[in-house]
Amino acid sequence: VNLLTAHPRGGCAVHARVPAGPNAPRGDPRNHVAIVRPAGMGTLYERFIKLKAQLEREGLFNPDAKKELPYFIHTIGIVTSPQAAALRDVAHTLARRAPHIELQLYPTLVQGELAAGQIAQAIVKANENKELDALLIIRGGGSLEDLWAFNEPEVAHAIFKSRLQPSAASATR
C-alpha cells in the first residue's frame, strides 16, 4: 500500500518521518519511511499561488467587477452542506441578530473530489432564484486538503458570474 502524500522526484527537498527502532523479526534497523511531504512552500500552496495568478489574469479580482450588497436584505441563499456546523452557527446568529431575514439552503458537498462541481452548481442554481438578495458560501474549519474544493477554478468562475453578491464565510473550528 502506498501511503505517500507526495511523490518526490530526484533532487526534490522533502521532510520524511522514519520510525526509529529495530525490525522485530531479526533486530535489524528499520528502513521504511512512514510519511513524506514536500519541504518548503508545499504543493497545495504552490497550486493556490498559480491559480490566483491565473484568475487575476482573467480579471476575476478586478475591483470594478465587485457588486454592492443591497441596502435591505430580505432573503439570503446559503451554499453549504446541510450537516455543516457552520450552517448552524450562521443560522443561529442571523436568527438572533436579523430574525426578519429568510434563509434558503442550496445543499452541496464541501469536501472531496465531487465538491467543487457541486458547489459551482449550487451557486448557479441560487442565482436562478430572483427572490435572493445575497449569497453566503459557507465552509467550516478543516485542513487545506479537505477544503481545497473552494479553491477550484469552477467555483471561482461561478462566484464571478453570480448576479448575487457572494460572501465567502468561514466559521471558526
Image (cartoon, rainbow, N blue to C red):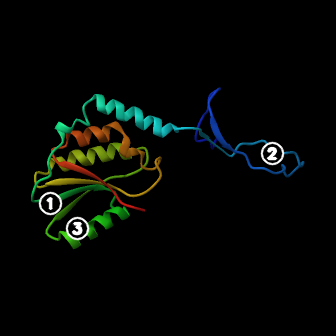
Q: Position of residue 19 (x, y in %)?
A: 74, 49
Mark 2–mark 3 distance (CA, rounded to whole Å): 56 Å
Q: CA distance from mark 1 to mark 2?
A: 61 Å
* Res. 83 visible in picture: no
Along the polypeptide, which appears first: circle 2 or circle 3? 2
Above or below, comparing residue 74 to residue 117 in the picture = below
User: From where the camera sits, is residue 18 visible?
Assistant: yes
Q: Mark 1 Cα within 10 Å, few/some/many (few <14, many 20+)?
A: some
Q: Which residue is mark 2?
A: 30
Q: CA distance from mark 3 to mark 1?
A: 11 Å
- Where does the image place residue 41, in percent across and percent down from the top left? 52, 38
Identify the residue shown where x is 17% and y is 71%.
Answer: 99
Q: Which mark is residue 75?
A: 1
Which residue shows up at 18% across the image and 38% down it?
Answer: 65
Residue 94 — which label? Answer: 3
Question: What SS does tag 2 mark?
Answer: loop
Secondary structure of residue under mark 3: helix
Q: Provide residue 108's location: percent of width, then percent of height.
A: 32, 52
Screen quadrant of the C terminus = bottom left
Q: Amino acid at mark 3?
A: Leu
Q: Which residue reaches farthest top?
A: 10
